[in-house]
Image (cartoon, grey):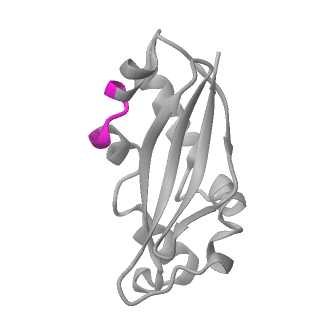
Amino acid sequence: MNNDNFALLFDEKVCAELLPPGKADEFFEALLGDASEGSYDIELVYDGSDGSNLQFNLLLHERPGHCLACNLTQGLPQVFSRHPVIDISGMVEQVNILLGNRARATGWHLGSTEQRSSSLHLIPLNISLG
């Protein structure tokens, strides 16, 4: 399956189903006991494929009236990789279902947090295909 077909498969709607918009509220409720204390919303976007990997990004959008500071987001790859509310493993299982017989996800890895602007950080999600 070429990159264009993966882009069609993992469009904005599918990415929102894999990581629903309310997931950040659930995460902050579990972490802080109050969803309104969260400083960002999380969005999953597809970012391409090289044929052996699928690249997604977890976008962290600063919430109005909050600060998206680097010291808050640098440790998130380790937290997100284990946190049951974010459930990266479950997300990858859903990717496998969507892939059907076209390919198979054989592993995944969260990269380091990248600051794109003061109000947008991202965490790369690389899914290996076999």
Farthest front residue in view: 117
Q: Position of residue 20 (x, y in %)?
A: 36, 53
Q: Quadrant of residue 12?
A: top left
Rendered view: 37 above or below 25? below
Task: Check residue 12 for magenta coloring.
Answer: yes
Against 93, residue 19 (above or below) is below
For image coordinates 59% across by 81% down, the residue present is 69
The answer to whether 90 appears left or right of 81 in the picture is left
- Is 3 drawn above or below residue 69 in the view shown? above
Which span of residues is magenta-colored?
8-13
Q: Residue at x 51, y 54 (%)?
A: 58
| Residue 60, horizontal then vertical, whole percent | 48, 65
Q: Position of residue 101 (x, y in %)?
A: 47, 9
Q: Quadrant for the C terminus, please.
A: top right
**Point 64% across, 61% down: residue:** 113
- Magenta segment, prevailing SS (helix, strand or loop): helix
